[in-house]
Amino acid sequence: MRRCLKKGDDYLGLKACKIMIGLLVRAGDDVAKDFPYRKVFSYLTDTLKSEKTSVKDVAIQITRSILQLGRSRSILFDESSECLYELVGIFKRTHEEPGVFQSGIVAVPQLQYGAGLCLWLLTFDRHVAAKLNKRYDLVPTMVEIARSAVKEKVIRVIVATWRNLIELAPQSNMPFLVDSKTTDCLYSIKARKLKDEDIKADVDALIERTEEQRSHMSTWDFYVSEVRSGRLSWTPAHRDESFWAMHAAKLDDDNHCVIRALHELLKNPPDTLSIAVACHDIGQYVHFNPAGKQ
């Protein structure tokens, strides 16, 4: 197989890789423990960068197959992050720049589904589930794709991923999934006349978990949850002066953890709206909390 991967022939390399991974998956994790995962992920990184959507699609299929093996998930996340970066990039660009893929022979929904399936398989690893969204900011893109998706399989893989995130790593992911946009998306999916029973079950379970969480949250809790999510919008608390008069001093609690989160957001902003809201919040903090000026 190594010779085939070095030939520079996409068809030959991908075919060899596909056959090898298929045999490996049938053999199971015990046989695959000494398999050179990183070399395969390195090869897949290059093929995922191809301008041909057909090559990207096959590379995604192979990645999906290899991720059926439990050990491969942590290796991809921790040791072959460049490959995962390319995979996430394809998933995001199908929404942000769909025109890039429309000239190819593989439809955009198929790329969304294939990349989404890889992300779903990754979230069966508890360690990955706790860090995946924090590292790649996936939930907002997933919300937008799920809202506009026509193919039920695309919606299914997204809500199944959310369910894994919230069940395997709730402390890390609950702040992102109780966000109003995510909750609105879940209710929007529920209102659609979808035939897939798996989607219905996952959406109902997610709504139950998020609503239960929201019922115990104060306005301050919602604010902190939003800040920790790393993405801000003009939710009511930001412009409510009574909120700031009551809670500004709380930003000093726990070694200024909320202020630190706002600072981190400004260093690595997801969008211009988040920058504007974070700057406003810091201004309100200084205005209503004399100690904040220090």
Image (spheres, grey):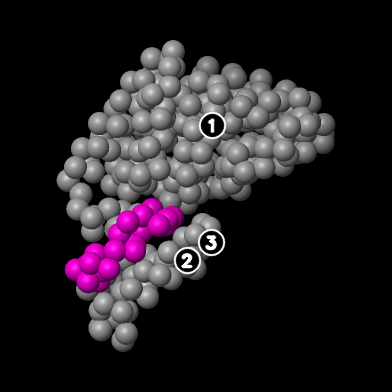
Q: What residue is shown with label 1?
A: 148
The residue tagged with tag 2: helix, strand or loop?
helix
Q: Is residue 262 magenta?
A: no
Which of the numbered marks, if any, corresponds to residue 272?
3
> Residue type at mark 3?
Thr
> Residue type at mark 1?
Ser
Disc 3 + disc 1, Cβ < 8 Å: no
Q: How far from the left and from the top, in percent, is residue 123?
A: 42, 36
Dot 2 surroundings within 10 Å: few (below 14), some, or many (20 or more)? some
Which of the numbered marks, if any, corresponds to residue 276?
2
Disc 2 + disc 3, Cβ < 8 Å: yes
> Residue type at mark 2?
Ala
Q: How far from the left and from the top, in percent, is residue 188?
A: 41, 30
Q: Is residue 42 left or right of residue 187?
A: right
| Magenta range | 227-248
The residue tagged with tag 1: helix, strand or loop?
helix
The N terminus lies in which quarter of the figure?
top right
Q: Overall secondary structure of the magenta stretch? A: helix
Cα–Cα gap, marks 2 and 3: 6 Å
Q: How far from the left and from the top, in percent, is residue 236?
A: 32, 56
